[in-house]
Every structure is written in structure tokens, then in C-alpha cells.
Amino acid sequence: MDDDLDELVRRVDPDRWLASRFVQDPGLRAEVVAVYAFDHELGRAPRVASSPLLGEMRLTWWREALDEIYEGRTVRRHPTAEALAAAVQRHHLAREILEAMIDARYRELDASPMTETEALDWARDSAGRAAEAAARILDPAAKAELAQAPGAVWALGRRLPEQPELRPAFERVLTTAKTAVRMIGVPAFPAVAHAVLAGRPNPSEFAKRWRLTLAVARGKI
């Protein structure tokens, strides 16, 4: 495992990092962390860019990285790009999953509040697709598309503080997600376990670990 990448995700994405601790195989855990690091880099693009154009340039950089990965060319020297390339090669992740994660971030370049439809699409194609990729890594036999709903729940839950009007949409997706996680199977469950933390008001570290442990033990969120 790339300890630096693992530490990065632990710091910037503690919910999904904690959920990844329930992956027993170190190699698979590292590959799941690589997906979360990729999602983090995409999410940074709109936040750190001083203009929408610069944000687009950052997203284009990652699209070009996917070109290198899927065309078998030398991948640019970036820890996340290199780790993602290894995961793609080993698990034959479909490009459309990672491409959708890039496309979802373009909406964030617009500072206006998302409509409910926009928020649902954004949540599904950002964190939802990341959960799908993680599920495919953990269990090739799983119906990984089921991970999109719990991944979307987590993304919407993080957006609620700034857009509380999205609460009804969050609750609807949560109902779907609760059904989906029961069908995803034990090996892939850590890819969706973090959804149990969605929409909760700043729980303590202990509370997060306890809720995740119960979710994994019961196979429910």
C-alpha cells in the first residue's frame, strides 16, 4: 500500500477511509483507497481553481490521465494516477465509471445552488460511481451498480448543511440505498458502509467507528 496516499485519504476523506479499514486484503484496500483519492482530486478541482476555466483545465488533466491509463501509455507521474492505473489494470474497471466521476464535477464549477435533479445526478455520478468502482474491486461477482445509491446518499448527506432543502431527496435515496446494500454481498459491503454516516450531525470518531462496525456486522445502513 502507498502509505502516503492512504494517509492523504485518511486526512481528507475520513468516512470512506474508516470504511476501507474493513477490507481485510491489503492490496484490495489500497486499490479502493486509490479510487477515493481519485474522487478527492476531482472534487478539489472546482474548489481550488480561481476560475471555472482553471477548474475545467484541472478536470481535463484527469481526463487525459484516463487516456493514458486506458490506451496503455506511460501514466503521468502522480501518486493517485499511478495507483488508479494499477487498480484499473488489475480489475478491468470500465472507463465509463471513472469518466462519469469527472463529468459530475463540472456542475460544481457553477456556484449556483443545485436543483434537486442536478443534485441527484451529481451524487450518483460522483460518490455513487466511486462506490461502484470500489465494489467492483472488492467483489467481481457483485452487482456493483447497486453501490451507486448508498454512495449517492453519502454525497447528498455531505451537501445537506449548505442545501437543507435537499433533505426530501436524501430521504428517498436513503430508502433505495437501504434495500441495495442488502443485496450487494459481504465482500463488497465496505464499499457502501460509509453511507451509514450520511446526514448525521458531526458524530465523534468513536461513534463513527461504532456505527460502521454495526453496519458491517449486520449488512445494513
Image (cartoon, rainbow, N blue to C red):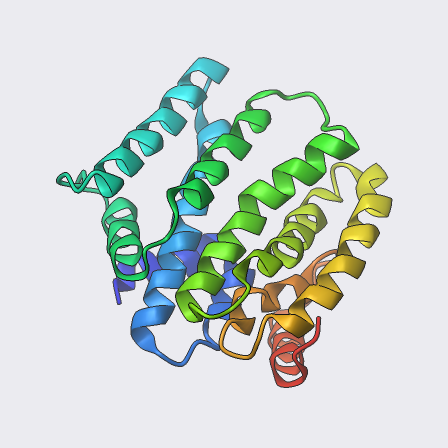
Q: Outermost residue toward the bottom?
A: 217
Left or right: 63, with 130 as reference point: left
Q: Residue at x 70, y 31 (%)?
A: 118
- In the rendered image, residue 109, in percent from the top left (x then y), is placed at 55, 23
Residue 59, above or below 159: above
Left or right: 162, with 74 as reference point: right
- In the rendered image, residue 187, in percent from the top left (x then y), is placed at 49, 77
Would residue 40 be visible to someone looking at this image? no
Placement of the C terminus among the 4 image quadrants: bottom right
* Quadrant of the rendered image containing residue 57: top left
- In the rendered image, residue 211, in percent from the top left (x then y), is placed at 67, 76
Q: Outermost residue toward the left?
A: 74
Nearer the observer, 89 or 112: 89
Nearer the observer, 97 or 150: 97
- In the rendered image, residue 108, in percent from the top left (x then y), is placed at 58, 28
Q: Residue at x 22, y 37 (%)?
A: 68
Residue 77, above or below 106: below
Would residue 170 be visible to someone looking at this image? yes
Placement of the N terminus among the 4 image quadrants: bottom left
* Quadrant of the rendered image containing residue 143: bottom right
Q: Residue at x 77, y 37 (%)?
A: 163
> What is the number of callouts on the image?
0
Residue 213, above or below 10: below
Residue 13, above or below 126: below
Q: Residue at x 65, y 72 (%)?
A: 183
